[in-house]
Image (spheres, rainbow, N blue to C red):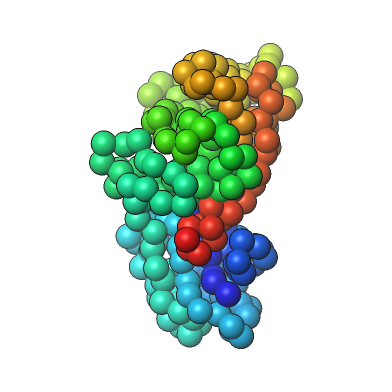
Amino acid sequence: MILLADVGNSRQKWALGEGHALGALGQVVNDDPGALAALLAGCPRAGLRRTVIASVAGESVNSLIREALALARLPTAEFVATPARAAGILVGYDNPGQLGCDRFLAMVGARARYPGPLVVADCGTAVTLDAVDGDGRHLGGAILPGRRLMREALVHGTRGVRVEAIEVAEVFGHDTAAGVASGSLYGLAGAIDGITARMSAALAEAPALVITGGDATALEPLLKHRYHNHPDLVLEGLVKYADS
């Protein structure tokens, strides 16, 4: 059995992997070491061989995770670095190490579910889209700011916009906060649709469209393209990669 973690820019999801099966442990925000300690304290020890972590959060968060694992007397963390080729994916970056391991693992997880061409959208703090052809060759990808970063850009880049984050159900905002929420949500959905269309046109066959990430549930109903939503896609790729 393997202890697995998907550590993003703001939160981390933990699971146990056995073969290609996953059992969720829970999730915590990155700046709450007490919650992480409590989560790890409840982790089963019997049969646990390794701890494998996909992290894009930076060394300060990774150090806290190492300390928490040591205090809980769990196996030392192995942090994933994106390889040039592994688990059926040939990375398309000139320097594979520049591709976030979460993006690589999302492609691995998506290809395990859908063996043909793919477009994979990961909607978190940043939004990424990656295309994979039928042979598992990563053609490259696109990166754009997520909803929170869009809102923050308006706050920091303008004088008159000072708003709290709110959820919206319609495109017409009737005050500044609703307008910013609408623009960030519907604007991001439009960007994802536009990039999806261009990536799909570059592939020889119609791709399976796969979406994941914290904002995927909010965005998916607004997309013109039909995406398959798999919230644990990075963890699914991580357990497959760890066993490859």
In the rendered image, the vertical position of residue 154 relative to residue 104, given as above or below: above
Q: Residue 169, position in %: x, y?
A: 73, 25
State left or right for residue 114 relative to residue 91.
right
Q: Can you give x and y, in whole percent of width and height, for residue 219 in the image?
A: 64, 30
Query: Does residue 147 appear in this view?
Result: no
- Foreground residue among 38 and 209: 209
The image position of residue 200, as x and y in percent, is 53, 20
Seen from this angle, which residue lies furthest left? Answer: 95
The answer to whether 215 appears left or right of 31 in the picture is right
Identity of the residue drawn at 34% across and 51% down:
83
Q: Is residue 65 above or below residue 84?
A: below
The quarter of the displayed image where residue 218 is located: top right
Residue drawn 41% across the image and 21% down it: 158
Q: Is residue 217 visible?
A: yes
Q: Which residue is located at x 61 percent, y 35 percent?
A: 210
Task: Give the number of callouts.
Answer: 0
Horizontal side of 233 relative to 168 (left or right) equals left
Residue 92 falls in which quadrant of the image? top left
